[in-house]
Image (cartoon, helix red, strand yellow):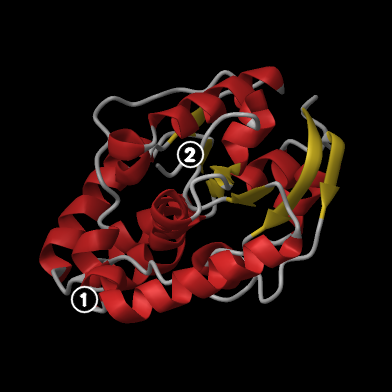
Amino acid sequence: MKAVSLFIPCTVDLFLPQVGEAVVHLLRRVGVDPIYHEEQTCCGQPAINAGYRKEARGAAKHFIEVFDRDEAVVSPSGSCVCMVKDHYPELLEDEPDWRRRAEDLAKRVYEFTQFLVDIQKVEDVGASFNGKVAYHESCHILRGLGVSEQPKKLIRAVKGTELVPLEAAENCCGFGGEFANDFPEISEGMVSLKVERYLASGADLLLLCEPGCLLNIGGYLSRNNPGKKVMHIASFLAGNGKGGNDGN
């Protein structure tokens, strides 16, 4: 692909820049030199979750204008990809031209591991890690995009790595955007259970593909189990598996 564009979501831009850097490094490693449009902004997911549909429509139109001419758009956030693919056409349904453009763009937007495995046909990125890892199935990535085997294929191809089962890996970690803010007690109960199952798995490292989950689980670990690590899969594959929590 000649025009592969990188969409960096707000959480990565503001809190997890190392994840964005890892994505660029890995794309270049597999022969893709991504474009970065500096005029990109939020996809509008926080606005629509809070009920601000007018503001979300404005963000959607800006996103479409920015990325409309790219052959593919790749993002390390499945929830943002879901916003573009699933919600833009519905959000703009009363404006036929914008809806058509939204539907056309939706076909060209990919979550990072989905792009590597399904589009680039790459599983082995030349990474190595001597230890056991578990994988958390983030809600939007699993249920919204149907992406589950792609990250696991990438993990299994890492030299020296054993992928171990995580009980109820598909269960929510309790982040859920505004959910964690509106219902903090429930959210903490959910993330504490996720961490309990991670510890029981015997894994040295917990991997995931969603920045929101990363911040939530990483924050809980830093307060309660600072010796354990959680990391975005891009950082892991880029060779940062021996570092600290991505989500701190």
Crowding at label 2, few (<14), some or many (≥20) Cα neighbours within 10 Å? Answer: many
Query: Dividing the picture into quarters, in which one does residue 224 lie?
Result: bottom left
* Residue that numbered label 1 is attached to: 182
Estimate the x, y position of residue 150 in percent, counting from the top left: 73, 52
195 or 145: which is nearer to us? Answer: 195
Q: Which of the two discs, 2 and 1, labels the residue nearer the N terminus? A: 1
134 or 147: which is nearer to us? Answer: 134
Q: Identify the image quadrant of the N terminus.
A: top right
Estimate the x, y position of residue 213 in percent, counting from the top left: 46, 58
At 44% from the left and 67% from the top, the residue drawn is 86
203 or 234: which is nearer to us? Answer: 203
* Residue that numbered label 2 is attached to: 246
Q: Secondary structure at mark 1?
A: helix
Q: Do callouts 2 and 1 mark residues in contact (Cβ within 8 Å)?
A: no
Q: CA distance from mark 2 to mark 1?
A: 24 Å
The answer to whether residue 173 is seen in the rendering is no
Estimate the x, y position of residue 18 in percent, counting from the top left: 45, 28
Q: Secondary structure at mark 2?
A: loop
At 63% from the left and 73% from the top, the residue drawn is 170
In the figure, 161 relative to 164: above or below? above
Query: Dividing the picture into quarters, in which one does residue 96 lie?
Result: bottom left
The amino acid marked with disc number 1 is: Asp
Q: Which mark is residue 204?
A: none
The amino acid marked with disc number 2 is: Asp
Q: Identify the image quadrant of the C terminus.
A: top left
